[in-house]
Amino acid sequence: MTTTISSIQADVPSTPFSRHIPKVVQQTLDEQRLVGTVVLVAHRGELIYQQAAGWADRELACPMTLNTIFRLASVSKPIIAVATLVLVAQGRLSLDGNISHWLPEFQPRLADGTEVQISVRQLLSHTAGLGYRFFETDGHGLYAQAGVSDGMDASGITLDENLRRLASVPLLYQPGTAWGYSLAIDVLGALIARVHGTPLAQAVHQLVTAPLGMADTGFVVDDPRRVATAYVNDTPQPHRLHEGETVSPFEGAVGITYSPARIFDAEAFPSGGAGMAGTALNFLHLLETLRQGGCALVPDALIGEMGRDQTGGLELPNAPGFGFGLGFSVLRDPCLAGSPESPGTWRWGGAYGHAWFVDGVRGLSVVAFTNTLYEGMSGRFVTELRDAVYQALEETK
């Protein structure tokens, strides 16, 4: 089947963005590294480029559209971070307070049994000592033995039960002394629900998505026809992600067990770190709201904290030049990272095949959602698209 590409701005006069970005997208589709994508670029508060390309479902010949809904995976983390900071702004949470004040039943300890204190800030910045099951080297790791869910499988358990299992596993390090990507945002989800006094989905709706008009973003999708089919990079072309399929994003790690059907199951526990779905346009609106500041939901001072490296100079694995803020990575050293992005750029992605970044210095927000893992999260496409954006930006001067 021939891959099609459509530029939503076909009737708009040619710009550097409309010249450079489609070349990258078309090449990636031609080489069958992606099945479909939505790319959005906002500059200084204006949506200057938008493109839906390829297939939302290749076998059914359903084209990608700007309104296609994607399983967000870790793209949900900044949404949960904003919900947390709304509660902080309301005085109902403290960034540096011990979370046991609100979640007394969640009491993980160090390997020697030492009790610890974990703060909201440490959860948001992944310095709390927690981990992910998918990082373990085989199926016999401590998280696997405890039956901990990473939030993307069909576990059949509740959020409270997952936290109970998580708390039974020793922490990997004393909170605040190291950095490790983790289930911390799932813990924050339980914390938000407890403080807000409603189920997490309702809390996030009331705190973030409803006030921002993100009508297509939530924990359950009612219309499967709008959701992009998930694919896995393969030879000669990506294959459909199977229910229960395990795919590792990192060499030496056991990998993530996926349930594409999970997003349609209202009984699945709401995973703050990986369980939401939404459109690229909804997510761009969230990013632009934060970048522009003056947000009624989150004061500028707290947005500043989100974009400040919270790690104390710790290095992120396989990410030279990057630190981590409250909900996403923060670029410390563009030279070390080999990136044209400005210092302080926010960046992260999602395991279903997504990447995004916000360069506040240049007034730039870029969202690229795809339905192909892991090319859309960490493959060549991510770097090639970034470079095309900055090449176009230079030509607009």
Image (cartoon, rainbow, N blue to C red):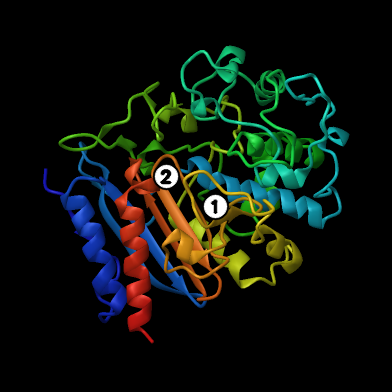
Q: Amino acid at mark 1?
A: Ala
* Mark 2 or 1: the one toward you: 2
Q: Quadrant for residue 35, please give it.
A: top left
**Residue 98 sits in quarter:** top right
Q: Identify the residue shown where x is 41% and y is 34%.
A: 250
Looking at numbered disc 2 in the image, what kind of residue is underneath it?
A: Phe
Q: On screen, 95 above or below 143? A: below
Residue labelled with disc 1? 215
The residue sitting at the left extreme is: 1
Q: Position of residue 1 (x, y in %)?
A: 11, 43
Residue behind mark 2: 70
* Quadrant of the rendered image containing residue 211: bottom right
Q: How far is mark 2 from mark 1, CA to CA?
A: 14 Å
Q: Is residue 60 left or right of residue 369?
A: left
Q: Position of residue 265 (x, y in %)?
A: 51, 27
- Residue 318, percent from left and from top: 47, 45
**Label 2 vs 1, first from the N-terminus:** 2
Q: Residues within 10 Å of mark 2 (few under 14, many from 20)?
A: many
Q: Is residue 80 visible?
A: yes
Q: Which one is nearer the viewer's eye here, 174 or 290?
A: 174
Task: Kindly identify the residue that appears in the image at 65 percent across and 57 percent down.
Answer: 309
Q: How many marks?
A: 2
Q: Residues within 10 Å of mark 1 (few under 14, many from 20)?
A: few
Using residue 85 as the reference point, say whether residue 328 is left or right of it: left
Relative vertical location of residue 352 with respect to residue 87 in this rendering, above or below: above
Secondary structure beneath dot 2 equals strand
